[in-house]
Amino acid sequence: MTEQSSDVILQRMMALHPKVIDLTLDRVWRLLAALNNPQNDLPPVVHIAGTNGKGSTQAMIRAGLEAAGKSVHAYTSPHLARFHERIRLAGTLITEDYLTAVLDECYGANNGENITYFEITTVAGLLAMARTPADFTLLEVGLGGRLDATNVIETPAVSVITPISIDHEQFLGNTLAKIASEKAGIIKRGVPVVVGPQPEDAMDVIEATAARLGAPILAYGQHWHVSVERDRLIYQDETGLLDLPLPNLPGAHQYENAGAAIATLRYLGQSAEACEAAVTSAYWPARMQRLSTGKLFDRAPNSELWLDGGHNAAAGVAIGAHLKTLAKRDTYLICGMLNTKDISGYLSPIAPSVQALYAVSIPGEANTLPAHTTAEAAQKVGMTAHIADSVHHALDMIAAQNPNARVLICGSLYLAGAVLREND
């Protein structure tokens, strides 16, 4: 089969529902039943929800389990460069032939009924994972939790909720409590839930949900603690203390993500060596990823080039804090965002560390903010802003002005994906 086989089926799947997002589980349950409920045949599941840090936390858990010799399925979204990135079977990205086969099977079983793209592709991922032997399954929620297509596991081994902040208000609600209620929807009766640091309003909701369902909580600041001392990550829980290297994923926010990953690994009975591998061996692209090779790098070889897909106010805070820890260097942003995001909330904490922003529209994305709108928002938070036709154009302009600049391409995972494809 050609590489385009799965693309053709994925394109057909886009037409099965008039909306990209329509939160309900009814269609998912119907299709799963038609496929003999593959979700019931998965290896033990770690289910991960939250606003920020889901992917990084999943990557660290996977690194720890694999270092312990375990085979691990992983499901994540969205993909960056290729759809195949969403489905990892026993440690390896799904092959084109197998992806095409399970997509085609799900498309046939759906029989033309309404179903969203994310729902039917999630079912395809569950089907592939159920048919492939492994020791664990890591499922990352796509949006929210309660009505997310991944929320079909009756009894996970453990649930994880990473930090919650305001995002996707049009689907999840406009307060932290409402959003937390949706995220807490992954908590299952009697199943322990590892909880990362949370705002008080969110934690109140999580605790109330867990209490109602008799789900034991393993919460940051209560049942486990993580801190940095002398450039070491110190993790402590009732089992004891771990003195570990700092995470290889950059940014201080990764310390708390590492804590949640370690708490999960410890609950699953993994060793100190597995916990160390979680922080030293994890790989998660487009999260303050340094680009040091490729076509984009070649356009500005003297620049320090970074890529990040964070896209909400909390991500802006994390990026702003990380930039302040880097060696002093003139820093420029190339930024493109979706029109559903809080662009001012995202840019405000980054603005003090930046010389100028070059605004771009996200290529091929119908919901992109126009570049001129991004530039206007940047100016309102005190940034010098310019408009560029593309990332290439922006990088060329920055390199012509300051060939030794630090350049951060940021604002959206969709932009990050386009960059990784361009840079290949």
Image (cartoon, helix red, strand yellow):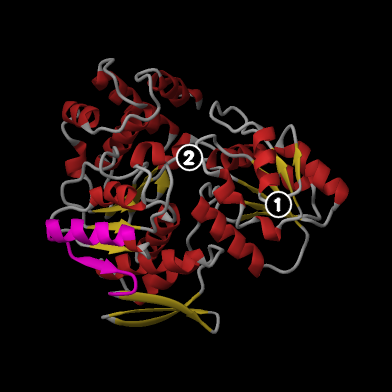
Residue type at tag 2: His
Residues in magenta, as a range = 201-222
List the single residue furthest toward the front: 380
Q: In this view, does 387 lie above or below 307?
A: above
Say which residue appears at 42% left-offset and 61% top-offset. Answer: 60
x, y percentage for residue 325?
64, 69
List the single residue furthest toward the top: 112
Q: Is residue 21 above or below residue 186?
A: above
Q: What element carries label 2?
A: loop
x, y percentage for residue 411?
59, 45
Q: Does residue 365 appear to the left or right of 32 in the view shown? A: right
Q: Kindly identify which numbered label has been placed on residue 400.
A: none
Q: Does residue 59 appear to the left or right of 379 in the view shown? A: left
Quarter-wise, where is residue 389 in the image? top right
Please name whichever residue, 41 or 286, is drawn nearer the observer in this view of the structure: 286
Q: Is residue 311 visible?
A: yes
Q: Does residue 405 appear to the left or right of 152 in the view shown? A: right
Quadrant for the C terminus in the image? top right
Q: What element carries label 1?
A: loop
Q: Is residue 412 magenta?
A: no
Quarter-wise, where is residue 350 in the image? bottom right
Q: Circle 2 is placed at which residue position?
A: 79
Q: Earlier in the sequence, mark 2 or mark 1?
A: 2
Say which residue appears at 39% left-offset and 17% top-offset. Answer: 15
Q: Circle 1 is placed at which residue position?
A: 382
Residue type at tag 1: Gly
Please name whichever residue, 241 or 278, is drawn nearer the observer in this view of the structure: 241
Distance Cα–Cα, label 2 vs label 1: 33 Å
Q: In this view, does 349 lie above or below 343?
A: below
